[in-house]
Image (cartoon, coloured by chain):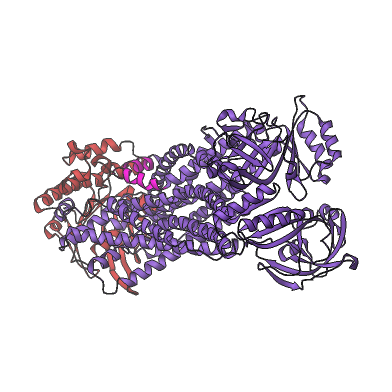
Chain colours: A purple, B red
Amino acid sequence: MMKWVLSMAWRDSRGSRRRMVLFVGSMVLGVAALVAINSFGANLRQAIDEQAKALLGADMSLESSAPFPDSVEVMIRDIGGDQSRRTSFSSMARFPRMDGVRLSTIRAQDGVYPWYGEVETDPPAAADDWVARGQALVDQTLVNQFELVPGDSVYVGGNGYTIAGTLLQTPRESAASGLFSPRVYVPLAGLDSTLLSFGSMADYEVYFRFTDGRDVEALADSLRPQLRPARIGVDSVIEERDNWDENLTNLYRFLSLVGFVALLLGSLGVASAVHVYISQRIETVATLRCFGATAGATLAVYAVQALGMGLVGAAGGALVGIGIQLAVPLVLADALPVDVSFALAPGAILLGAGIGVGVTVLFALLPLLAVRRISPLRAIRSQVDQDAGERADWMTWGIRALVVLGVVVFSIIQAPSVGFGLAYAAAIAVVFGALALLARLLIWMVRRLRQRTLPYVVRQGLANLQRPNNQTLLLTLALGLGTFLIGTMLVTERTLLDQVDLSGRAGSANLVFFDIQSDQVDGVREALVEAQVPVVDQVPIVTMRIESVKGRSVRSIREDSTRQGPRWPFTREYRSSYRDYLTDSETLVEGALTDSASLSDGAFPISVEQDLAADLDVSLGDTIVWNVQGMMMPTVIGSIREVDWRRVQTNFFFVFPRGVLEGAPQFVVILARSPDEAAAGRAQSAVARRYANVSAIDVSLVLTVFDAIFSRIAFVIRFMALFSVLTGFIVLFGAVVISRIQRIAETVLLKTLGASQAQVMRIMLVEYIALGVLASLTGLGLALASGWALARFVFQAPLSTGGPGLLLITVGVVSLVVLIGLVSSRGVYRRSALDVLREEG
Amino acid sequence: MPPVLEVAGLSKSYRSGGRPLEVLKQVTFTLNDGDTCAIVGPSGSGKTTLLGLAAGLDAPSTGSVRLCGEDIGPATEDERARIRNQFVGFVFQSFRLIPTLTALENVRVPADLRGDDEAARRASDLLTEVGLGERQDHYPSQLSGGEQQRVALARAFINRPRILFADEPTGNLDTETGERVADLLFELNRTAGTTLVLVTHDLELARRTGRVIRLRSGAVQEDTRGAA
């Protein structure tokens, strides 16, 4: 029987093979996305393995947020090997030729590091000896912003450096590292020491290279417990590699999940196409049944065809995927710390192709199961009562269960965690379900609409959406999903940008100067007055750590393995302020703010932010003992505040009353409001010239930076979403071609009854416009819903609809649907009635 | 040797508009090897329903059908398929050739289903016998209506069926072609000794059979045996 099944499957496919290739065309891109991303993932892991040492640039590193204490310096000396130092901190970089300043990450290093991996610069020669020549390297962001060229100078603190070139790539960092805070590399020797004065935050690193063949991992393991109390981190090649591996694996896995949506969409296209295909095969199946073919054998004939389609689609998808694999490193270039070279990844190709075949066959089987219920009676009469056979049987339920199980298993395999995978599968179900529901609702509305008095052409065009074997729901779903993905991206992007934008405009401050020493406050205020930038607020800041909470030491809390919740609130350094009022961004939730207190009173009341209170598990009346730079200070929780962290304000977890912190070492933040960009530039330059250690944040620049970062993330997600969008259009193309026979019959009938070619074309136009509007409204409806949910629950911001962007998407989708619809129907509306009647005769 | 076809008290009803509609009522007849029988009657009289039930394409509401000694009433659809493949041949009004198969491939389908190694040779011989030896590799769309029905005749005989059911075999053909196809049908039937059940509106064609069963409103109105 198998021989017959195979030969029948092959013979029966004659004349339909082109159409079948079109069926599978819709899943090619989905497979391609999986193959490309997973192959890239394999390439990436290999690159990380091969270039593990280049990731750290050394064999081992120690890192601390404070200068290494003497005891650790002794330890470092004893460790031996080749050593290199680097100190990183935030400071204003000043570019005199353009009279520009920008808060930057300054990396001061001695020029020995890195030993492994390469520092890439433009021009390439700049990477050599820039430290020895006392020059600087700057990030591409700065080069672009200030139109810098080699030979320009940059001032960091009081010291000026000639710019040797642009830094393109260096160990431990990806190009995207410089996006938020651009980097400036300067020699460690001769660094302006005032930059690292009290209040400045800096990272101190020492790198090691060992040539004596010692076991570096064992060394790192032995150092960690010794250095942990001093809050010094120890990093080795393997740890660095594992960190990158985990982060990048999560990245490409996330992308493959986005790509999987395209595959699911394509599979729905296959299922729908198979449904139409089978409806055109009913008589053949009935005839075979008459001559003795069993239900199983006829099902097998078409299942073999589906398998063949799946194999062809998977092979095509794998080939396209390999092509796209070449493009992935370009898309992700900024996020990669290593050079990823192209290599075929057989495992990834087989996995992608296998998933493609599996999904195609499963989705095709759903409509194929109907073959078993085609009665042989259909060979002698066209109307057969088959109501009893329409009910889903165990096999139908089994296939449905396999489809669900397949999606869940794939999601779990591909997602970074089981929980994420399950959530993803659930999200897919919700999105597909909501799209289907919305699409049905819109189709119902269109049906109601056509009953009204409308011109014939419009009524007929709308009626076509309801024709037997119509694929309106599928197409609305397929095109709607693409629109939904793009729409959600747009709405979310606008929501976030509006947030930052509004903060800058509506808030009182748009310039923040920080790290100001007490004796520099008057000078900064003076400089601002000169630059005609009014000061809005001046806030003192004192650094401190928690010693104990509710009488229990931080050490014992940290070592308590049974404790739930985060540990960082107990171990971090807090920057707190003191005042007797609430700011605009604060609301009192419990208790009352204490105006002033005295150290002689013993434990005094302080105010805590409500989320942190939950993390620390403290409530009104609970005690916290603080270590304020060596001095123990007992406090009680006197009030709990809600803080709107998005406002450009100096917001604090803890606010102390007046009268207790004034004597502690402190620094000051000044908030100012500049009327325009030029004044902001003048004010920053003036302050930077006077006080090298004072840094400034320009809120409008934050918006630009945020925009740049979001654009890059959006680009990557859009790249993956593109697969779904294109798949949607392929499904549309396929659906139109598959229903060609039916369309020709309709056209001929209309022409026979007297319709002109123009009328037939206008009917089609109405149908495709209606389809495009249905699809885009379905997608945009859900995009607004998901955008609102993201805005409300994730970003806690009001929704921004994206304005003309959404309208543009609608116009784009409708235009493309009309274009593809009319192009793929070409010839249908030109057919003469007589030609077809002759063919049929 | 049991009769080739025994139909006893056969009834069939459907639900139409929520009410039962009896389309065949208590039909009983028997056919032996080599018998030829025409079922005639106006449209809607139950001819096609009777053919479908007698050939094992459908299950009766009441009554029984025994095909070559096997009771097909309680048989499953797959068991009926086996019985059809073993004992039954079909000729349809609209030929029902599979458009994607060549003439030769169409003819050999029933034999292939049986796993007959001689399928190709027998199909070729039969096509030659119906005068289409030169057109074996043509697809149905490349053949005229008469040629297509001749291919269908060849297909009907390839498994050497004991009984052949023909549903309006000349209904889609012009008079001249229809006569030639009918001649061929009876000739093949005679040569093979097959029992023939013919459903037709064409009384001329019906008269060429040995027995005519006339149906009216689902019941046998007249059962006459002729000289043929």
Q: Position of residue A161 (x, y in %)?
A: 64, 36
Q: The C terminus of chain B is located in which quarter? A: bottom left
Residue A622 lies in the magenta-colored region = no
Tell me, yes or no, if residue B206 can be seen here.
Answer: yes
How many numbered callouts? 0
Q: Nearer the viewer, residue A749 or A732?
A: A732
Q: Nearer the viewer, residue A196 or B20?
A: A196
> Which portion, as a residue range, is magenta?
A4-26
Q: Residue furthest front?
A: A530
Q: Position of residue B131 (x, y in %)?
A: 16, 40
Q: Answer with the quarter of the image where residue A749 lies.
A: bottom left
Q: Residue at x 59, y 36 (%)?
A: A167
Q: Answer with the quarter of the image where residue A639 lies.
A: bottom right
Residue A10 lies in the magenta-colored region = yes
Q: Residue at x 66, y 68 (%)?
A: A584
Q: Overall secondary structure of the magenta stretch?
A: helix
Q: Classify A9 as above or below A478.
A: above
Q: Position of residue B37 (x, y in %)?
A: 20, 57
Q: Residue furthest top?
A: A212
Q: Position of residue B73 (x, y in %)?
A: 37, 60
- Residue A248 shown left or right of residue B73 in the figure: right
Q: Nearer the viewer, residue A260 or A511?
A: A511
- Residue A61 shown left or right of residue B26 in the figure: right
Tell me, yes or no, if residue A382 can be seen here.
Answer: no
Q: Residue furthest left?
A: B176
Q: Residue at x 56, y 50 (%)?
A: A705
